[in-house]
Amino acid sequence: SAAWLRYAPVPGASNYRSLPSAIVALNSSTSSPVFVASQELQKGVKGILGKQLSLANGTNKASSSIIVGTADAYKEAYGNFDEADELEDDGYFLSTKGKNVMIIGQNPRGALYGAFEYLSRLGQGKFSPVSYVSNPHAPIRWVNEWNNMDGSIERGYAGLSFFFRNGLVVENVTRAAEYARILASLGINGIIINNVNANATLLSTRNIDGIGRIADAMRPYGVQVGISLNFASPQTFGGLSTFDPLNPAVDAWWANITDQIYKRVPDMAGYLVKANSEGQPGPLTYNRTLADGANMFARAAKPHRGVVMFRAFVYDNHINESNWKNDRANAAVEFFKDLDGKFDENVVVQIKFGPIDFQVREPPSPLFSTLRNTSTAVELQVQPEYLGQNCHLVYLAPQWKEILEFDMRADNKGSKVKDIISGERFKRPLGGSAGVVNVGTNATWLGHHLSMSNLYAYGQLAWDPSQEPDEILQDWIRLTFGFDRHVMNTIVDMSMKSWPAYENYSGNLGIQTLTDILYTHFGPNPATQDGNGWGQWTRADGFSVGMDRTAKNGTGNAGQYAPAIAQMFENIDTTPDNLLLWFHHVNYTHPLKSGKTVIQHFYDAHYEGAATAQTFVPMWEALKGKIDDQRFNEVLFRQVFQAGHSLVWRDAISRFYHNKSGIADRHNRVDNY
Ligand code: GCU
């Protein structure tokens, strides 16, 4: 579907008269984002305002026009303008104040971003004259798509891949272009098209041409394609006897294959590498450092100006729970701290937002404040793997916002995560964000109409993290569903309640999500957390629960943060309740700041969360007739499922801890199995 790019008619639009009659594109090459912008403007204005604008190339100085192009092209045709100096890479200037509408990008895709912004304003009925420069918060605003060569998608919940089938890149790249359009409307400038658990057959000559096909389809939207690499490729695919990153033959092999890819895709974004994690090969196999591994790709990509995103998600998944000090959450800092400053300039360390794995609540990864001489990016999951897999509505922007705004207090100075990843705090040349989206062939893109707010919000926050989650949501609703107040209030209300509700009926107080962690990552299964090497432990026994991550008695994880934060988490009294069990091991009877005990909080939260999910059904039902039947029914189906599944969650989790602790619920709601 067209997502938020429906260009639906806006009520009251007939009052909007101050519209030029022509669009002037300052670049007529059909593969330029400037040209795409002019076409998009024509289509959008027609849809939203019912007015057919003519499309002119070159200058049209007589009548008033919507002028779209780069700053350089504008200056050449019309002369200088004051705001030109304020433009940064990918930024744009939008002005609707003068005779002409000016949509001027610092570069071609900046012009396209400005056009989408203008259309978004029109589409929301925001007609008042404006004039402003908008620059992106960070240079890297990418999505990651975990697509496999056979056409499946790892942790994808919306159909099959539209990039690959039967080991090959597909012939028809229409949907890739449609997706690029959606991404461009959010200012997203890069996409990794294949799974981080990468398959080396993507590097075959035929598939390199296929990558070129996808890149050709996405290029007009300013979206640069990149790929995930399998570290062992020189051996498993190239026929060498080794994949040791310090072996010159291996180095040469990567340089050669990189040259081949860039020959077909001269503007390729770069590489993403998952190494020495969850069974993936990597440099540690040869006693080389992770930096040795990353820099090998960096050297190959550098002549082409490619970037290497090297994942910090490196940990041992066979750790022993009987050692109280073992902790998977320590892994990233342990693996990376001594490598700070040893990565080449075009390497970016891509860090999952929390120390474990996209749980319902985690503190920010301590690695953000550990790496000072290394560019970093935050990895977020737009498709909520542990959070209901788009069978539940969970609007994630509030969670991301908490992470981005978290002040890590590096050197006791303001060090918000958002300013670390932008490169600003530690004066790094690169950085930004990567969102795992995993869209598929399903017409809804993500499987749930309402989950598209997550993709929208991801792009908005990557561009400008100062925005508020509820305001982003309102924009998205106007563009997606129109202007009905009741529709607006309902979707805002449900969405803003959805993350707290999910946290309530899944894992509370920072214990992690408590979903099945061994196979599906779906549905309640608290017993799977402990007794295995994955390290997502809760250490729940008959009396007590939680991970002791203090430096004093525990795993030392709290000590990985900068002193002010370390102190806060080290001390049970200053640890916020919602992270209590992340950092501390306490009795079930431990009193929270709210005055409740841990166990009673578990019971109450589960009943509250599930009760909230029940209300989503009648709330949605009341919108019948105000939303087209198809979307109405498809959402209702998911809401009913969520309501039912929240009861399953509620009962499974409360009974599990009731059985363990033997402590009765004060309100006598919880029985044994
Ligand atoms: C999670 C996810 C895996 C994925 C891994 C990763 O554990 O369940 O499917 O491969 O993260 O991000 O590498």
Image: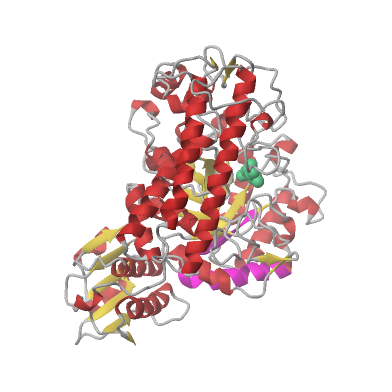
Q: Quadrant of the C terminus?
A: top right
Secondary structure mainly formed by the magenta segment: helix
Task: Looking at the picture, tell me which residue is in the foreground, 110 or 38.
Answer: 38
Task: Please provide the residue range marked out in magenta.
Answer: 206-228
Q: Is residue 252 left or right of residue 20?
A: right
State the residue at coordinates (64%, 22%).
659
Rendered image quadrant of residue 282: top right
State the residue at coordinates (63%, 30%).
536
Name the residue furthest top.
552
Q: Is residue 608 above or below residue 622?
A: above
Note whether residue 660 is visible.
yes
Coordinates of residue 86 in the picture (x, y in percent): 26, 58
Membership of 334 in magenta stretch: no
Coordinates of residue 441 in the picture (x, y in percent): 61, 66
Task: Looking at the picture, tell me which residue is in the foreground, 520 or 142.
Answer: 520
Coordinates of residue 338 in the picture (x, y in percent): 56, 30
